[in-house]
Every structure is written in C-alpha cells, then in structure tokens.
Image: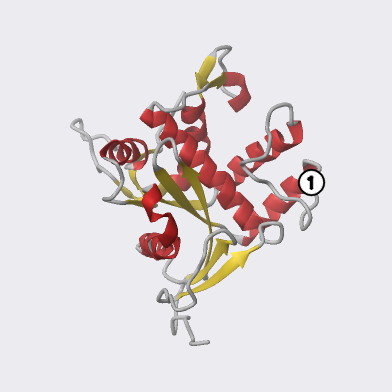
Amino acid sequence: MENWMPDSTKHPPVRSYIDDSIHDRGNFIVLTAVCAKEEDLVDAITAMEECGFVYGRDEFKSSMTMHSNVRAQDLRERFHGIIRHCKIAIGIYPLSDRSTLSALVENLVQAISINDGYKYGTIYLDEGIRWRTSNVIRDFEVVPNCDSRKEIGIQLADCCAHTISTMLLDELGIKTSMVPASRYQIDDDGMISLAWALWASIRYGLAGGILSNEFDNGDFLDPYYKPFGLVVSDRCDEEVKRAAQNRFGRVWLGCIS
C-alpha cells in the first residue's frame, strides 16, 4: 500500500467512524463522521458492558426496539454523553445519491480535514457503505466493511447518524416528539422537544473552533460557532437545505436553560 501518512505532524492521527441514516419521508441521507479518541472508544465499551451488553457479540443499532427496552435506552443515553466529547461532521444528501456513497464519504472527509488537527488519519466505514478500492483520499487510510460489533466507533456513528436525522426530521416538521424534561436532567416538570434535547446533548461535538460572529451589536462575545463539518448537497430539496442550515449551520455554545 502506498504510504498515506504525512512526513511530519504535531497532531496525532484522526480516527473517524462513518455510518449513514436513510429517510424516505424526508428524501435525504445523513452521513455522520464521529472523530473519536482512544478514551472515547474505551468509554463506549464500558458503557455497553455496564448496560448489560457484550462487546464483540452485541451491538447498538438505532433500529433496535427502544420501547420498554431499558438497557437499549440507557446505552443510547450513554452514547450521547460520549459523542458530545467527540467531533462530529455531517453530510446531508438526497436519496438519489444512495448508489454513490463512497464519493460522498470523500466529500465529508474533506470537510473534516479543514479543521486544524484533523489533517490525516484513518477512516472506518460501516459495512453497509460500499467503498471502491480505486478511491483514494489524500492523507487518509480507509478501512471499509467494518463489523460494528468489533468496531465500537461504528456503533457511535450509527447512534449519531440517527440522532442528527431525528433533529432534521423535526426541523422539517415531518416528525416531532416531546419528552419529559427530567429525562435530560433539566430542572423542569414539563415536556421539551426531543430534537432540542438531542441537540443540547451533543452540541459541543457539532461545534468547530471558529466563531460564527465574533461580536454582536453590543460588542459582547456571541458564542455561536461554525460547525465542525457540514456538507449539504445542492441536489437536496430546497426545504431540506434550509432546514439543515437552520439546524446545523451554526452552533450555540452559550448557556441554555
């Protein structure tokens, strides 16, 4: 194999795990890349075991039955807590691009590599994403056909892709849900939007390191940040493009209540 590593760098190599979530109702595909550190992966394995699953045999799938499945619900919440410490890049594409997912992966990795400290590394793809061996992404090694039972990072990416899709479906008005605020440790006896709660749980992972607007009109710091990575295809429906930008185009890192 050709040497894909840069000659020198001050940053450790990136490990990014990619999975997709496909939604006919919204006519879109979400690809998420979860850039995880070793400690994030260890925490995910620990979470599985503490929730009663066996790493290497069992796996978290967003398609699992969640109703009355306390173990799966607990693991999902644990994964959300881990994902917020990772960095998340999002790609949103129309269903018509489903046969060209490998090209979309390249597109998403390019968005990741714009960030300082994420210039090279290894990309792990879920086995459902077909990768053409002729494809080469500069400075990145691609590991296709990953079994998510053995690559815990793919399970995090699966959870993340479903979470992002839930938020986008809500923004489109296709599917909205309310949940008890207490479920997300919010001091309120009422109900809150599930999409808002999910966003709040992973917003630090969605944010890049660049302020969207440095100062507001009163010369106070405006804590909106540009996303770590967001690719919205021009081929998406107009309403999907608007919803994606509204929801993910910038990330608030100020106080929330």
Can you name the residue that lies furthest to the left here?
Answer: 217
> As rendered, which of 4 and 244 lies closer to the eye?
244
| Residue in the picture at 58% in, 45% down | 159
**Whether residue 242 is situated above or below residue 85 in the rendered picture:** above
**Whether residue 175 is situated above or below residue 166 in the rendered picture:** above
Q: Position of residue 243 (x, y in %)?
A: 33, 36
**Whether residue 208 is situated above or below residue 70 in the rendered picture:** below
| Residue in the picture at 43% in, 33% down | 169
> As rendered, which of 11 and 83 lies closer to the eye?
83
Amino acid type, callout 1: Phe
The residue under label 1 is 53
Can you name the residue that lies furthest to the bottom here?
Answer: 2
- Is residue 84 visible to us here? no
**Whether residue 120 is situated above or below residue 229 in the rendered picture:** below
172 vs 45, left or right, is: left
Q: How is the image coloured?
A: secondary structure
Which element carries disc 1, helix, strand or loop? Answer: loop
Q: Quadrant of residue 118?
A: bottom left
The crowding category of the residue bearing disc 1, from other C-alpha atoms within 10 Å (few below 14, some 14 to 19, many at least 20), is some
> As rendered, which of 252 and 154 lies closer to the eye?
154
66 vs 105, left or right, is: right
- Is residue 176 visible to us here? yes
138 vs 34, left or right, is: left
Q: Position of residue 202 (x, y in %)?
A: 51, 40
| Residue in the picture at 53% in, 52% down | 86
